Image: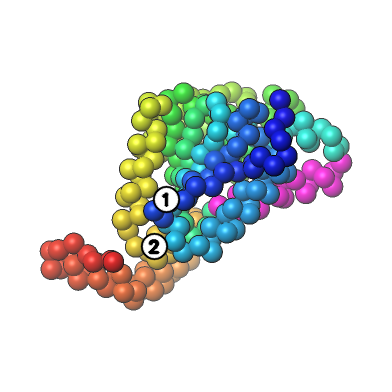
Amino acid sequence: MSLPADVPFVLRGDVAGVTTLTLNRGERFNPLSEEMLAALQAEFKAIALDEKVRVVVLAAAGKAFCAGHDLKQMQVHPSEAYYKSLFQQCSKLMLTIQKLPQPVIARVHGLATAAGCQLVGMCDLAVASENASFAVSGVNVGLFCSTPAVALSRNVSRKQAMEMLLTGNFIDARTAMQRGLVNRVVNPEQLDTCVAELVASIVAKPALAISMGKQLFYKQLEMGVEAAYQLAGQTMACNMLDDTAQEGVQAFLEKRRPDWS
């Protein structure tokens, strides 16, 4: 069943500094079609410039989180130029999430496969329902999940990533947590509560420290240890000069709660 053209691919909700983006093609397991990728890109671009947003929750409608790329759409355009453009569009979105000033938390239920698993891997944090399952299953249709491999291999160990990529087999939520793909696994009815707890913990901290810390974290991972320490020291020095850090340290010394209002 196709939805009317005016039904948005992504729903946005904003409450008290928390933006929830919901993939809104649940009847098809929220595939990352051209339209879905464009809608997400537009939302994240706007969020990056919105200082009122402190945390982003990435959720999904329907029975699953995301089934990956839209294979039906891909099959209609059998050309190298089209496929290169599509995968570049997807990679741009993944990098946008990583470069976003605000932390992004994936709220995962049902399946997250191929580029959907990649999407989970690129979020800063992930909370999964016990009914969630994960796979980079492109190899099952003859398509090795090369771009999802970038995110997967930066979350789980090399051999575990290769096993998933070579076999296309699913892993359950508990295994995903053990391997480092998600942070927490909870009963389905506790999923929103668990996400809300993480959100509250982050929102309670100064926005500048969170933003600077996120940027530093990903940059230093790609560096040698000496360059990483140099960048980290520079980041901490700049962070320490900020009024929120000065207030936080002073409050600690005076054994009181910091006033970041």
Q: In which quadrant is the N terminus drawn?
A: top right
Which residue in the rendered view is the most extreme toward the bottom? 241
**Badge nearest the viewer, 1 or 2:** 1
Whether residue 20 is in magenta: the answer is: no
Residue 204, visible in the rendered structure:
yes
Residue 28 coordinates in the image, percent (x, y): 65, 28
Amino acid type of the residue that numbered disc 1 sits on in the rendered structure: Val
Which mark, residue 253? none
Q: Which residue is mark 1?
A: 15
Q: Residue at x 33, y 43 (%)?
A: 197
Query: Which color scheme does this rendered protein use?
Result: rainbow
Amino acid type of the residue that numbered disc 2 sits on in the rendered structure: Ala
Which residue in the rendered view is the most extreme toward the left? 255
Q: In which quadrant is the C terminus drawn?
A: bottom left
Side (left or right) of 117 relative to 227: right
Q: Quadrant of residue 64?
A: top right
Q: Is residue 236 above or below residue 186?
A: below
Residue 111 coordinates in the image, percent (x, y): 55, 27
**Distance between the Cα atoms at labels 1 and 2?**
16 Å
Crowding around mark 1 (Cα neighbors within 10 Å: few <14, some 14 to 19, many 20+) is few
Q: Are marks 1 and 2 in contact (CB under 8 Å)?
A: no
SS at circle 1: strand
Q: Main secondary structure of the magenta part?
A: helix
Q: Residue at x 35, y 36 (%)?
A: 193
Q: Which residue is mark 2?
A: 207
Residue 143 coordinates in the image, percent (x, y): 73, 31
**Number of dots carrying numbers:** 2
Side (left or right) of 196 relative to 63: left
Q: Which residues are magenta?
A: 79-97
Which residue in the rendered view is the most extreme toward the right? 79
